[in-house]
Amino acid sequence: MTKKQTKRILRIALLLGTVISLFFVPWILVKAWILPLPDTVQEQVNEALGYGFEGIIVYVDQGGKDPAFYAAGWKNREQHIPADPHSLFKIASIGKLYDAVAITKLVNSKRLSLDKTLAEYFPELVGKIENAEKITLRMMVQHRSGIPNLTDSPNFWTNPPKNNKEALERVIDLPANFDPDEAYEYSNTNYLLLSELIEKVVGHSKFQYIKEEILIPRNLNNTFGSLTEVNMENLMSGYYVGIEEDIKTTDYGSMIATAEDVGIFLRALNNGSLFEEGEQEIYSSVYVYEHTGLIPGYQSIAKYHQDIDAVVIQFTNTTDFEGYNWSLSEMTYNRIVKILRKKKAHNTSGKLTPAAAPH
């Protein structure tokens, strides 16, 4: 076979591989990827309904501008109530940012130590959680403990535990996924144990501590610790593809907040105003400054974009088994940020210099 023939065969094989891979890619993802970028955030929010979301909320806090609120679709599909950008929403793992701040404040005040072990704080777990004598508080905050993820346990989402004790029982006596500090693996069990530790130290509920230290000083009055604390009419409905009924009353233990409250918190986290002296250095050494959240019926993204000085929060109230909706949620979010960057670049390039400005 000549070199020319070999190259031709390779080109054909590559083309066939591309065609086959496209055949298996959901076309909704391709559609979302190739559509032209709209001119405005609201147009992109409206476009997201074509991706299969029942409802979407977006909050944008860009430096030098008033916060902007966007929404499309349904807050409650059955009752035909339009999406409200001020609705409450289950923020799922975004709550870990609040937990990490709480841990930071307790470490800074010497009530906790990042270098003490799980065994020192919970001696009753020795022999029940592998490597308890080696796993430090720092490793749990950073998801480097090796403790199995409780939400990966069988039937967790169809038969959720009623409390932390039941949740922890899902992983008791399971072998570690890796030796402490040898790898990274996201594990909700880490933050369940951290929640228990916060309550053990402060002597009352974790959320009460978060409320006193983080929420009240910033007038974040639309952030709640559980479903029992909210008016359910103010909570955005949640939907799972293939299930007709609204699943918002199912309790997975998530914090609940408005997009605005999350945005104000995230701005304070990123600019450092959330911290007392010495706390930001501790926080930066253990955790991140942005997060996403995902539980059945609820997807959330909370990030700060330094290049455009913008906090962008996005809530979508539809999830699926395959995870396509998560990919579509991320695509929507990234396109919104692109629109904001494009506008920022246009406004910057269009500004007149003082010498050229009209009088």
Image (cartoon, rainbow, N blue to C red):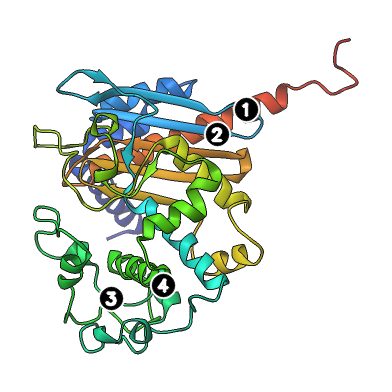
Q: Are marks 2 and 3 in contact (CB under 8 Å)?
A: no
Q: Are marks 3 and 1 in contact (CB under 8 Å)?
A: no
Q: Are marks 2 and 1 in contact (CB under 8 Å)?
A: yes
Residue type at mark 3: give it. Answer: Ile
* Residue at numbered disc 4: 201
Q: Earlier along the polypeptide chain: callout 1 or callout 4?
A: 1
CA gap between label 2 and label 4 equals 35 Å
Q: Nearer the viewer, mark 2 or mark 4?
A: 4
CA gap between label 2 and label 1 equals 7 Å
Q: Nearer the viewer, residue 216 or 356?
A: 216
Rendered residue at 62%/54% (across/down): 272
Residue type at mark 1: give it. Answer: Lys
Q: In this view, does 176 lie to the left or right of 242?
A: right
Q: Mark 1 packing: few (<14 Cα in 10 Å), some, or many (20+)? A: few
Q: Earlier along the polypeptide chain: callout 2 or callout 4?
A: 2
Q: Do the residues labelled 3 and 4 touch (CB within 8 Å)?
A: no
* Residue at numbered disc 3: 147
Q: Earlier along the polypeptide chain: callout 3 or callout 1?
A: 1
Q: Which of marks 1 and 4 is in front?
A: 4
Rendered residue at 49%/20% (across/down): 39
Rendered residue at 31%/59% (across/down): 2
